[in-house]
Image (cartoon, helix red, strand yellow):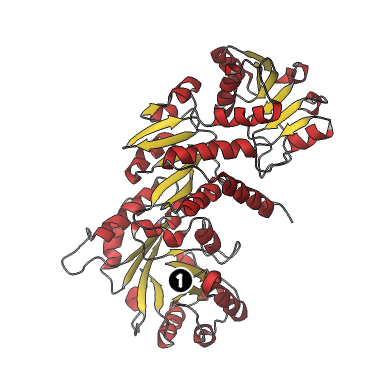
């Protein structure tokens, strides 16, 4: 179930949000609505509960547990007891206050534990303690400091779902569990897969009740949370940052189009080794790999496709019977777009900006097509080392304007959303008639491409490369042809929505 918290600061605004959250049919967002009384200065419970469109959780969170209520504890308890008298389906009360809560009537009681500092290792012990209370449902919400913290929550949910945590005087009670913060977003999405009683999504951006809360619309329309179950296959993007990526939009749309029970998630990864080892327990079926991990992931894999082995960089991982095999679809995708625009690349003088995994993949493809490559990078030593490996030329970044070129390719993330005013090279590099290819696709028209076009250059944006490499990933993972037209439409619509009004 998806619960929408109401965080309005007046009764009137709260009532409006309740109606919006509980809409029927295609407009339905919430399965359950949580009214946060601590956000409202003078809550009118009778009005708030009189015409509720969905089951209601009444919560009045004190400041010590991350809420806004700073009045007397007795007054807070009285508010919750009044909600019981008015027929609220659920009451949420803190683990250190439940002993003072007497009047429960027919309402189900949720006992809550919040940790805004970390995800402790003893979640089972915390669950045991809370489960031994008089509550009907246990809620444990922690903060993810590392993406692997989510694994502790998944493990707890799985054990409760299997009935492993049983005690002499009580059976396992239903549990709500997930992590807060950006690194905990995946646990909010995957809550249904691992057996959480419900999860939370905000009514809109700016109406969140906790850090890392996605909107209910995104949960339903992008991640299809109402279709996630224990059989849902997992895929995702390994990178840092990942918030800009269109991967979740196109791959989840493609899964939905073909009726594949799968979900694609953004994994913001800092410690790559710990992530790869830890997430093997989730049996993730495939990964996309982006900056800065395309080269670093190679030693953590069980094998490489021949092309990826030659390039020594990976942007795709396929789980084959528990073995993680690396592929590179960047090279073929980039060369396909270049050849569609320029035709034969043999003998073309190409200046390649960057020396990371994408540069390595594109340079390898250009070398196969006998282009004349010069590498340039802000860190000159990286360009020199890569040039030695590939057997091509390199120049110091300060000399980029002196290089004779017909084609300029930016393989760095410079100019990518949200830093759209950045440009990877000085304007003096542009010459009328030359080709400029920017692999950045968000935004489509980067500053590099705008400046180049204004100076008489031909330009190629990064969208086709992104789509071609993603389609090949999808086919490697699923064995099905990728719905390329759908994927392109989804990206273009998303980019339009993202533009500043």
Query: Looking at the picture, how far across and down is residue 259, in whole percent?
Result: 44, 54
Q: Position of residue 360 (x, y in %)?
A: 56, 23
Position in image of residue 427 (x %, y %): 80, 28
Q: Is residue 234 left or right of residue 481?
A: left
Where, quadrant-wise, is the N terminus in this rendering?
Answer: bottom left
Quadrant of the frame with the C terminus: bottom right
Q: Residue furthest left?
A: 168
Tell me where residue 460 sits by quadrant. top right
Which residue is nearer to you in this view: 416 or 264?
A: 264
Residue 209 visible in the picture: yes
In this picture, residue 376 sits left or right of residue 112: right
Figure check: 390 above or below 116? above
Judging by the rendered image, the residue that carries numbered circle 1 is 31
Q: Residue at x 57, y 37 (%)?
A: 468
Q: Is residue 214 visible?
A: no
198 or 450: which is nearer to us? 450
Foreground residue among 417 and 330: 330
Please tell me whether residue 229 is drawn above or below residue 336 in the rendered image: below
Q: How many marks?
A: 1
Q: Residues within 10 Å of mark 1 (few under 14, many from 20)?
A: some
Q: Position of residue 372 (x, y in %)?
A: 66, 15
Residue visible at 60% across and 51% down in the picture: 490
- For the point 57% across and 12% down, the residue is 388
| Label 1 SS | loop
């Amino acid at each position: 179930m998806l619960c929408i918290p109401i965080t309005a600061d007046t009764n009137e605004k709260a009532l409006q949000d309740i109606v919006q959250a509980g809409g029927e049919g295609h407009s339905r967002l919430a399965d359950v609505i949580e009214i946060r009384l601590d956000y409202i200065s003078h809550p009118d419970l009778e009005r708030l509960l009189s015409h509720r469109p969905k089951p209601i959780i009444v919560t009045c969170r004190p400041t010590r547990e991350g809420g806004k209520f700073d009045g007397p504890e007795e007054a807070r308890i009285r508010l919750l007891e009044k909600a019981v008298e008015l027929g609220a389906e659920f009451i949420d009360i803190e683990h250190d206050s439940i002993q003072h809560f007497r009047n429960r009537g027919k309402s189900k009681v949720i006992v809550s534990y919040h940790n805004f500092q970390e995800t402790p290792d003893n979640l089972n012990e915390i669950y045991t303690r809370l489960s031994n209370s008089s509550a009907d449902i246990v809620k444990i919400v922690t903060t993810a400091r590392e993406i692997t913290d989510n694994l502790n929550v998944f493990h707890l949910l799985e054990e409760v779902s299997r009935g492993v945590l049983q005690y002499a005087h009580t059976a396992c009670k239903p549990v709500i569990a997930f992590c807060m913060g950006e690194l905990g977003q995946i646990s909010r999405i995957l809550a249904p897969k691992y057996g959480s009683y419900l999860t939370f999504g905000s009514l809109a951006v700016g109406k969140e009740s906790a850090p890392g809360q996605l909107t209910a619309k995104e949960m339903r329309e992008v991640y299809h949370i109402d279709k996630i179950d224990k059989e849902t296959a997992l895929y995702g993007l390994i990178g840092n940052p990942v918030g800009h990526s269109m991967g979740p939009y196109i791959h989840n749309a493609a899964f939905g189009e073909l009726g594949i029970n799968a979900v694609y998630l953004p994994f913001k990864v800092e410690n790559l080794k710990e992530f790869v080892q830890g997430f093997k327990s989730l049996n993730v079926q495939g990964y996309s790999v982006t900056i800065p991990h395309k080269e670093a992931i190679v030693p953590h894999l069980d094998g490489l496709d021949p092309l990826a082995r030659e390039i020594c960089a990976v942007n795709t991982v396929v789980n084959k019977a528990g073995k993680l095999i690396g592929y590179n679809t960047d090279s073929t995708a980039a060369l396909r777009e270049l050849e569609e625009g320029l035709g034969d690349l043999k003998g073309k003088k190409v200046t390649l900006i960057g020396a990371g995994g994408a540069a390595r993949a594109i340079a390898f493809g250009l070398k196969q097509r006998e282009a004349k490559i010069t590498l340039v990078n802000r860190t000159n030593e990286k360009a020199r080392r890569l040039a030695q490996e590939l057997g091509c030329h390199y120049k110091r970044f300060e000399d980029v304007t002196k290089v004779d070129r017909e084609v300029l390719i930016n393989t760095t993330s410079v100019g990518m959303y949200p830093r759209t005013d950045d440009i990877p090279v000085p304007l003096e590099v542009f010459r009328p008639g030359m080709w400029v290819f920017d692999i950045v696709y968000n935004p489509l028209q980067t500053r590099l491409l705008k400046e180049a076009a204004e100076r008489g250059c031909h330009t190629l944006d990064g969208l086709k490369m992104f789509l071609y490499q993603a389609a090949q990933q999808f086919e490697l993972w699923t064995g099905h042809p990728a719905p390329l037209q759908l994927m392109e439409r989804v990206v273009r619509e998303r980019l339009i929505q993202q533009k500043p009004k």
